[in-house]
Amino acid sequence: MEDTHDIIGFSSGGEKILGVVIYHYSNPLDDFYIIYADYALHKTHSSSEDAEIILENVIIPACDEALADYRLKRQHLRDMDTLHKEFKALMDALKSKMDMDGVFSSDVE
């Protein structure tokens, strides 16, 4: 399960959002969480489908910074993955072109 200060994705109002776990109470039957996200505190249980807002207009700068940093790093990983796929496709196209031109054929000495 998630622990305090972990960044997690959860559902609130039918929308998936990211938040920072502020408080986690562990119980053998059901875990209880207080999560900071979108300038509000949300309450959820591990078994519940949707979190409910318990306090709005809350600003926790450290959590906002952690969420922004997490989003940037996640976007950077997506960008790197996209670039890797494009580079691999380019290398495959170049290899295919060279094979057609006979550069890699077995009769080249």
Image (spheres, helix red, strand yellow):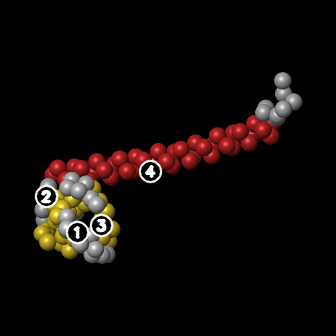
Name the residue carrying label 2: 59
**Which quadrant of the figure has residue 17?**
bottom left
Q: Residues within 10 Å of mark 1 (few under 14, many from 20)?
A: few
Which residue appears farthest toward the front when viewing the image?
28
Which residue appears farthest toward the right when viewing the image?
107
- Give how far across and how far down residue 18 sits, in percent: 29, 61
Name the residue carrying label 1: 28
- Give how far across and how far down residue 12 sits, in percent: 27, 72
Write the residue at 28% across / 48% down: 69
In the rendered structure, find residue 10 and report the number of the disc placed on it: 3
Judged left or right of residue 89, residue 29 is: left
Look at the image and tell me in which quarter the C terminus lies: top right
Q: Amino acid at mark 1?
A: Pro
Q: Residues within 10 Å of mark 3 (few under 14, many from 20)?
A: some
Write the residue at 37% across / 50% down: 74
Task: Point out the tag, 3 or 4, that comes first from the N-terminus.
Answer: 3
Tell me if residue 7 comes above or below residue 11 in the rendering.
Answer: above
Measure the alpha-carbon separation of dots 1 and 4. Answer: 37 Å
Judged left or right of residue 86, residue 102 is: right
Of discs 1 and 4, which sits in the foreground? 1
Dot 3 and dot 2 residues touching (CB under 8 Å) = no
Q: Amino acid at mark 4?
A: Arg
Task: Point out the tag, 1 or 4, that comes first from the N-terminus.
Answer: 1
Measure the alpha-carbon separation of dots 1 and 2. Answer: 32 Å
Identify the secondary structure beneath mark 4.
Answer: helix
Q: Is residue 13 visible?
A: no
